[in-house]
Amino acid sequence: MTNRRTLLLASIGAATAVPLLRLLDQPAIAAGTTKFSYTLTDAQWRAKLPALSYEVLRHEATERPFTSPLNDEHRAGTFACKGCALPLFASSTKFDSGTGWPSFFRPLANAVGTSTDSTLGFTRTEVHCRRCGGHLGHVFDDGPPPTGLRYCMNGASLTFTPTKA
């Protein structure tokens, strides 16, 4: 039976399939003109990361919505970059946006960078790790107070470390 959620997920899948296939043939972000303090060769990134994390972090792919176990992570702790382990978000800034991806209203200080992304035919703000340049997701202006921002992150680009009791 088809319902709104099924149609929405199918639309998202169709909208991301063509750009995703195009992105898989592009060079890694760290190979560009931007210099990052943590760099590896493409072969080293492939060896270090699981396949989906490699595609997301190094080639700006997007994981399917509602697939990341980090969506259901509610313990106190820190979310970090899966590529270089830089702490990115405190769990106290995580909220359920209903989008299917882990969402936060504020990154940690000096943790992320942004750039303009027009791959889907409209302009969005891409979020990347400040240290390794890995693609994390996008930021939108429809989040909750106090910032009004929604950092919509790919769970495949993150790790979670709970706070020690």
Image (cartoon, rainbow, N blue to C red):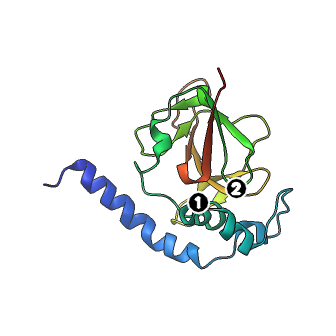
Q: Is residue 61 above or below residue 79?
A: below
Q: The N terminus appears in which quarter of the rendering?
A: bottom left
Disc 1 and disc 2: Cα gap in Å?
Answer: 8 Å
Mark 2 is on which residue type? Gly
Q: In this view, does 32 lie above or below 115?
A: below
Residue 164: mark in rendering? none
Q: Position of residue 60 (x, y in %)?
A: 60, 63
Q: Report the residue marked by disc 2.
A: 83
Farthest residue toward the top? 165
Residue at 75 percent across and 42 percent down: it is 111
How packed mark 2 is, by other alpha carbons closer than 10 Å (few <14, some 14-19, many 20 or more), is many
Q: Position of residue 152 (x, y in %)?
A: 54, 45
Q: Position of residue 18 (x, y in %)?
A: 45, 73
Q: In this view, does 76 lie above or below 54?
A: above
Q: The C terminus appears in which quarter of the rendering?
A: top right
Residue at 58 percent across and 58 percent down: it is 123
Residue 53: mark in rendering? 1
The answer to whether the residue labelled 1 contacts the one labelled 2, judged by CB atoms less than 8 Å apart, is: yes
Mark 1 is on which residue type? Ser
Of residue 130 and residue 158, the one placed in the foreground of this image is: 158
- SS for dot 1: helix
Q: Earlier in the sequence, mark 1 or mark 2?
A: 1
Residue at 76 percent across and 66 percent down: it is 30
Farthest residue toward the front? 165
Q: Position of residue 51 (x, y in %)?
A: 56, 66
